[in-house]
Amino acid sequence: MTEANERSDAGQGIEGVLLANRDRIVRFLHLRGAGDAAEDLFQDLWMRLTDRRTGPIADPLSYVMRAANNLMLDRYRSTQRSDIRDKAWGESAALPKPSAETLLISREQLALAERAITATGERPARIFRRFRIDGISQRDIAGEMGVSLSTVEADLRKVYAVLADVRRQFDAS
């Protein structure tokens, strides 16, 4: 692509740069390890970059390519964390079966934790379950429940504080 074309793309904004360089960006993502997911990652990149309000960008193609690289880094880190988590779960599955006494104590502790979570109120309990159990992002939960992100964070802190108190009770006994 010529320098004149890149300048005219910049005039069209980030969307113009994305459209004009789509094949190049998808190929870049593919070569960076995205494989068959390169098209999906391009869509994610499109959503990330077009949702933002940015000022003038001196070199929009470099900006887009840097964002694509950052997207791949985020994907790599997420995969690494997932692999570590899966390995830890796999190792814990190989542990010997707990005794009947341990099972009873664990059930009692779980019941105490559930009551503590419920005592925080309906919204904080729901937010906690959506975030920690369902794996929904805090931003998505805020949109789903019609509250601000800071409200979601405050409700999570409230539940975490209650669970920390319950944990201290377990440790004391």
Image (cartoon, rainbow, N blue to C red):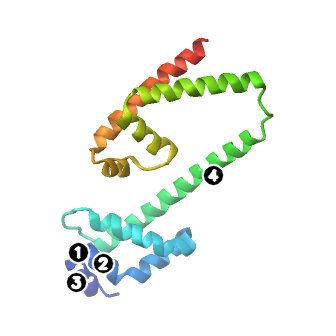
What distance separates the C-alpha of mark 3 from that of mark 1? Answer: 9 Å
Helix, strand or loop for disc 3:
helix
First of labels 4, 2 by sequence position: 2
Residue 126, image x and y in percent?
Answer: 41, 40
Q: In the image as oriented, which residue stretches furthest toward the top?
A: 173
Cβ–Cβ under 8 Å for marks 1 and 2: yes
State which quadrant residue 117 falls in. Answer: top left
**The disc label shown at residue 62, or none:** none
First of labels 3, 4 by sequence position: 3
Mark 1, other Cα within 10 Å: few <14 / some 14–19 / many ≥20:
some
Which residue is pictured at 26% across the width and 62% down the height? 52
First of labels 4, 1 by sequence position: 1
**The disc label shown at residue 17, or none:** 2
Name above or below for residue 28 compared with residue 112: below
Which residue is pictured at 53% across the width and 74% down the height? 30
In this view, the residue in front, 61 or 104, is 104
Mark 4, other Cα within 10 Å: few <14 / some 14–19 / many ≥20:
few
Residue type indicated by callout 4 = Asp
Cβ–Cβ under 8 Å for marks 4 and 2: no
Q: Is residue 31 visible?
A: no
In the image, taking residue 98 as reference, residue 167 lies left or right, namely left
Which tag is nearer the camera, tag 4 or tag 2? 4
Which residue is pictured at 37% across the width and 48% down the height? 141
Give the residue at mark 4.
Answer: 83
